[in-house]
Amino acid sequence: MSSTPSVAPGSNVSTGSKTKGVLSLVFGIISVVFSPFLPILWILFGIAAVILGFVSRRSEPGARKLALAGIITGFIGIALCIASMILGAVIVTEMIQQQQ
């Protein structure tokens, strides 16, 4: 007789994986670093970082700190992308006004 516990296929057993937490942090860092360059694209990475961070906090208990760092960097990246878009709009508006 074997005494190993059986696990039903498809059950939600934590294996200690930190993939979502790491991805959240990486996407957040990418969003922060590249926010001045083509912010409309990098804001998507910030949004993904925040979403993955919250998902990771629920499903990966061992990655709570990584997930929190990903959430924070994701929100910072989103804010920097928005600021970059506003600054770009102001600069373009000023250039157009100077030409007239």
Image (tube, rainbow, N blue to C red):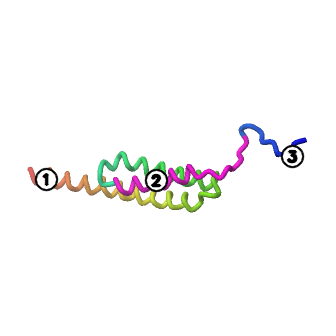
Q: Which residue occupies the extreme top position in the image?
A: 9
Q: Earlier in the sequence, mark 1 or mark 3?
A: 3
For the residues marked 1 and 3, what is the alpha-carbon distance in whole angstroms? 79 Å
Q: Quadrant of residue 36?
A: bottom left
Residue denoted by label 3: 3
Residue denoted by label 1: 97
Numbered tag placed on residue 26 in the rendering: 2
Q: Earlier in the sequence, mark 2 or mark 1?
A: 2
Q: Horizontal and vertical percent for residue 88?
A: 25, 53
Q: Horizontal and vertical percent for residue 57?
A: 60, 56
Describe the element under mark 1 as helix, strand or loop: helix
Depth check, mark 1 against mark 3: the one in front is 3
Q: Which residue occupies the extreme right position in the image?
A: 1
Describe the element under mark 2 as helix, strand or loop: helix
The residue under label 1 is which amino acid type?
Answer: Gln
Q: Residue at x 59, y 60 (%)?
A: 64
Q: Residues within 10 Å of mark 3 (few under 14, many from 20)?
A: few
Range covered by the magenta-colored residues: 11-34
Describe the element under mark 3 as helix, strand or loop: loop
Q: Residue at x 46, y 50 (%)?
A: 47
For the residues marked 2 and 1, what is the alpha-carbon distance in whole angstroms? 40 Å
Q: Residues within 10 Å of mark 2 (few under 14, many from 20)?
A: many
